[in-house]
Image: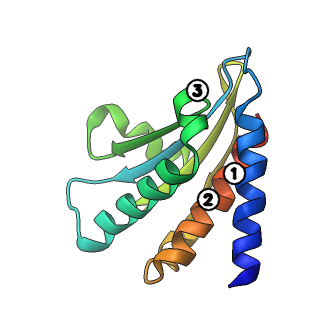
Amino acid sequence: MLKIFFVLVYLFFNTAASDCVADETGSHVDVYYFLTNYRCASCHKIENFTKEAVNENFTNALNSGKLNYKSINIDKKENKHFIDKYQLFTKSVVLSLKKGGKERKNKNLSKVWEYLGNETKFKNYIIKETAAFVNEL
């Protein structure tokens, strides 16, 4: 538990410090939650835990536009392209690093399903992975 605390403190200060740097390139990170029309309790839980982790830990990055959270319904025709782009086969959380108007890197956070039964572990996973992307800006 103490180790998790120190990791969170490290991530907080690292992220807070990077949030203070002016971003003149328009670079940012998108946190996508991909959903469908059918929404089970687990789907809602993944969305809520992800939103909470991002909103509670990346306020400066969100306010500055360096980080964006988006829920996207892939059952809508205009969003179908995400299925191939990110190789989606179920509800997913995907991080996308954009620099100079182009996606440079993305990661499907597949362990969200594994950690769904443990809110703390789930949120720590989201925080750690998101911080790593934000720190690349």
* Residue position marked by numbered label 3 in the rendering: 64
Give the residue drawn at x 44%, y 37%.
81
Toward which corner of the image does residue 109 lie, by quadrant?
Answer: bottom right
Question: Do the numbered discs 3 and 1 sit on residues whose CB atoms are within 8 Å?
Answer: no
Q: Which kind of residue does numbered mark 3 sit on? A: Ser
Question: Do the numbered discs 3 and 2 sit on residues whose CB atoms are within 8 Å?
Answer: no
Give the residue drawn at x 37%, y 40%.
80
The numbered mark at residue 131 is 1
Does residue 77 appear left or right of residue 50 in this picture?
left
- Residue 64: horizontal and vertical position, in percent? 58, 26
- Residue 103: horizontal and vertical position, in percent? 66, 32
User: Badge 2: few (under 14), some or many (20 or more) residues near its Cα, within 10 Å?
Assistant: many
Classify mark 3: helix, strand or loop: helix
- Residue 79: horizontal and vertical position, in percent? 36, 37
Question: Do the numbered discs 1 and 2 sit on residues whose CB atoms are within 8 Å?
Answer: yes
* Residue position marked by numbered label 2 in the rendering: 127
Q: Is residue 62 visible?
A: yes
Which of pointers 3 and 2 lies earlier in the amino acid sequence? 3
Which of pointers 3 and 1 indicates the residue nearer the eye? 3
Classify mark 2: helix, strand or loop: helix
Q: Which residue sits furthest top?
A: 24
